[in-house]
Amino acid sequence: MNDQVPAQSTVALAVGHTLEPREARTPMALLPYQQRWCADKTQVKVMEKSRRIGLSWGEAADTALLAASTSGMDAWYIGYTKDMAEEFIRDCADWARMYGLAAGEIEEGEEVFIDGDERQSILTFTIRFASGWRVTALSSSPRNLRGKQGRVIIDEAAFHTALGELLKAAMALLIWGGEVHVISTHDGAENPFNELCQDIRAGKVPYALHRVTFDDAVTDGLYERVCLRTGKEPTEEGKAKWVADIRAQYRDNAGEELDCIPKNSGGAWLNRALIEARMYDAPVLRWKPPADNFVLWSDEQRTAEMRDWLEANVLPLLLALDPDLTSGFGEDFGRTGDLTSIAPFQIERNMTRKFPFLLELANCPFDQQREALFYIGDRLPRMRSGKLDARGNGQYLAEKAQQRWGASRIECVMLSQTWYRDNTAPLKAAFEDGTILLPRSADVLDDLRAFQVVKGIPLIPDVRSKGSDGQQRHGDAGVAILLAWAASCAEAEPAEGETVEAEPDLYRSSRPGGWRGNGGRGGFLGHH
């Protein structure tokens, strides 16, 4: 700690501090949930909390000690209003005085940065410690973290206008041992802050997540602390009335403001909770070339490689399908950037559309995409319909599918605003009615949540993301599922006298009786 701090500071001892290693900082002056937050030394930690429970005040207690220590670091506080910045810096100064730490006066100044060709400045509040470290409050612009090092505290994160970019800038500080603390109440289910919390719960990021509701804070002594500060005598009757009055003030917003339950956001198409409720344990299969030069292998080698993989991974799932149920599929096309996603379904007897698996193809040559699609389509029991993305290079595979199974069963879809407008509403109704079942997958969930309502129409914006496997995604599974749902609702029966292209079989399935609805044909297509 600061060399000028008395080894036995009476104030420090009163709050349980020895003022030695950072690991020992857990002030007794703080309530238990504040102590737990300060004691957690995870490099990135997130707090979803109730309103006005003193979490930022507890953070100031820990940050003052951090900046006062000779082995500490700078701290950068980012709130979304000037008042929040001033309050946090004052709290840090108050804690410094309480601990008996050597700190200067609060400085109000400017931080200058270059934005393109313009030189701009922002208002800052800073307190400097004798250790040489400082605590500074900045505005919430992501560019203000460039070149910084130390601890970043993002307060009321859900209310920052560019939280995603702000977090990205903050994470850069971790490389040299920095820390990122994210604190907020909720502001909608589709808010980036809630998405961050859900990603932590899903294990997608290695961050620590804390959660303190109003009731949790009351259990830990919040009411008694308020009474101590206001000079009132705490009683059980007084506590009950105080809690009831607080909840009455928030009325319909109490769930979000006090209980950490985010409301559904008006601009979102599908919320996370609704999608998760329609998921079950089913696989998402992924294939990518076994070698960088796979596309240059001979036709026979590529066909054999794909055939072997399909037989080992896909055939068992197809054999498990109910032979008496109607089937179909949707397909979203990708080649070297985005994925190709194939989404087969069966219509159960209660009219629920159940997706037994999804297949994702990354950097897959055109021929092998055709082989994989034909392999699945030929083996779907009572296959009645399919819709394929026919934009750009996807037109090749869509045409091949139409040639194989007929124009009355296969539609080559040119995705457009009009098509999305006409087909997204029925899919959303299926989620709301519980008539769709999808494989449980964080990537599938993210792809469905990628839909954004633009001028009243749910669309996939031109923004890419990365999946759990590091592969680029563009809502691929979401589009395939949407196409599959539309196919399941289509009037698609083979027209009388319609001819269907036949291709030679390289091998045949041993399933007795062939594949109902497909003429018993079950071969792997290696040529076209």
Image: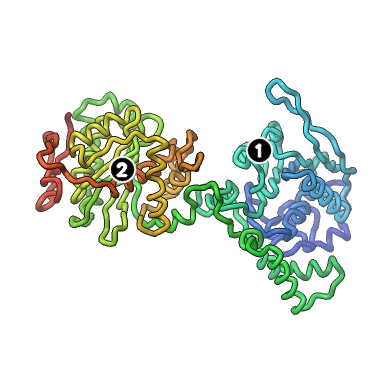
Residue at x-position 74% and y-position 67%: 222
Along the line of sight, which residue is nearer the eye, 189 or 177? 189
Report helix, strand or loop for mark 1: helix
Report helix, strand or loop for mark 2: strand
Numbered label attached to residue 473: none
Relative to residue 497, is residue 266 depicted above or below?
A: below
Query: 10 Å neighbourhood of mark 2: few (<14), some, or many (≥20)?
Result: many
Q: What residue type is labelled 1?
A: Leu
Residue at x-position 66% and y-position 58%: 49
Residue at x-position 68% and y-position 50%: 156
Relative to residue 115, is residue 306 depicted above or below?
A: below
Image coords of residue 159 (percent x, y): 66, 47
User: Number of numbered discs present?
Assistant: 2
Q: Which amino acid does label 2 sit on?
A: Gly
Q: Does the residue at mark 1 contact the one at mark 2 (Cβ under 8 Å)?
A: no
Residue that label 1 marks: 173
Along the line of sight, which residue is nearer the eye, 311 or 245? 245
Along the line of sight, which residue is nearer the eye, 265 or 226? 265
**Horizontal placement of 332 versus 528: left or right?**
right
Residue that label 2 marks: 330
| Precedes in sequence: disc 1 or disc 2 | 1
Image coords of residue 395 (percent x, y): 29, 30
